[in-house]
Amino acid sequence: MRKLCLLVAVAASTSVVAVTWAAASPQDPSRTPQGYAFCGWSSFDGSWTMASPEPGAYMVAFADGMTCRSARRNINRVRYSQRPPYRPVRTGYRCHVLERQHEYLDVRCVKVGGTRKFRYRTGA
C-alpha cells in the first residue's frame, strides 16, 4: 500500500512538472490558438522574426481580424498600469490576461466596439 501511494505521488508530481514545462516553453506555429494567425517572434530589439527564437526569454504574436504588422505594432505599444493590480493597457483595446504563471503570460486584447483582436504570449 505504501509503495502504491508513493508511486501515485511521483506520477502526480511528474505530470505537474510536465504541464508547467509545456506551458512555459515557447509556442511553435503549429500550436497557434484557434482562429488566430501566427505573426512571429519578437527579438526584443524592436524587430520581429518568423524563425524560432534562441533559448531564453521569448514573446510570440498572433492576430485575428487584422494584419500581422498591425498586431505586432499594437503589441509593442502595450503598457502596464503603474499601480497594483498590474494590468496590460492599450488605448482603444480591452486587454485581458488569459493565463498567468511563473515567467509565463498569455494576453488577449480586443478592439473596443469591434472584433479585431491580437494576442501575445511571453515567458522564459
Image: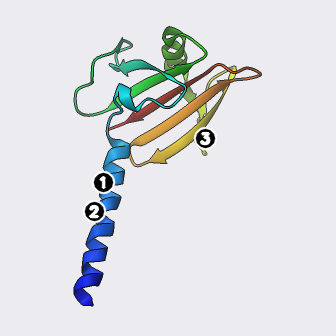
Q: Amino acid at mark 2?
A: Thr
- State the separation of the CA atoms marked 1 and 2: 6 Å
Q: Residue at x 65, y 26 (%)?
A: 110
Residue wearing tag 2: 14
In the displayed structure, does residue 81 sit left or right of residue 49?
right
Give amino acid for label 1: Ala
Name the one closer to the observer, 8 or 84. Answer: 8
Q: Is residue 91 above or below residue 55?
A: above
Q: Earlier in the sequence, mark 1 or mark 3?
A: 1
Q: Amino acid at mark 3?
A: Arg
Point out residue 93 in the picture as x, y percentages from the top left corner: 67, 24
Q: Is residue 70 above or below residue 33?
A: above
Q: Position of residue 100 (x, y in %)?
A: 49, 46
Instruction: Measure the alpha-carbon separation of dots 1 and 3.
Output: 34 Å
Give the mark nearest the N terminus, 2 or 3: 2
Relative side of 66 to 112, left or right: left
Taking depth in this image into account, of 90 and 8 the one nearest to the observer is 8
Relative vertical location of residue 95 with respect to residue 13 in this rendering, above or below: above
Secondary structure found at label 1? helix
Picture coordinates of residue 8 (x, y %)?
A: 30, 75
Q: Could you tell me how far apart the alpha carbons at marks 2 and 3 are, in whole angstroms?
A: 37 Å
Residue plotted at (38% across, 18% down): 40
The label number, if any, that marks residue 18 in the structure image: 1
Q: Please report the residue visible at 69 percent of the width from the left and 20 percent of the height from the top.
A: 92
Residue contact between numbered discs 1 and 3, judged by CB atoms under 8 Å? no
From the image, tell me which residue sits under label 3.
83
Q: Do labels 2 and 3 touch, CB within 8 Å? A: no
Q: Residues within 10 Å of mark 3 (few under 14, many from 20)?
A: few
Rendered position, 56 above or below 84: above
**Residue 59 badge:** none
Residue contact between numbered discs 1 and 2, judged by CB atoms under 8 Å: yes
Which element is circle 2 on? helix
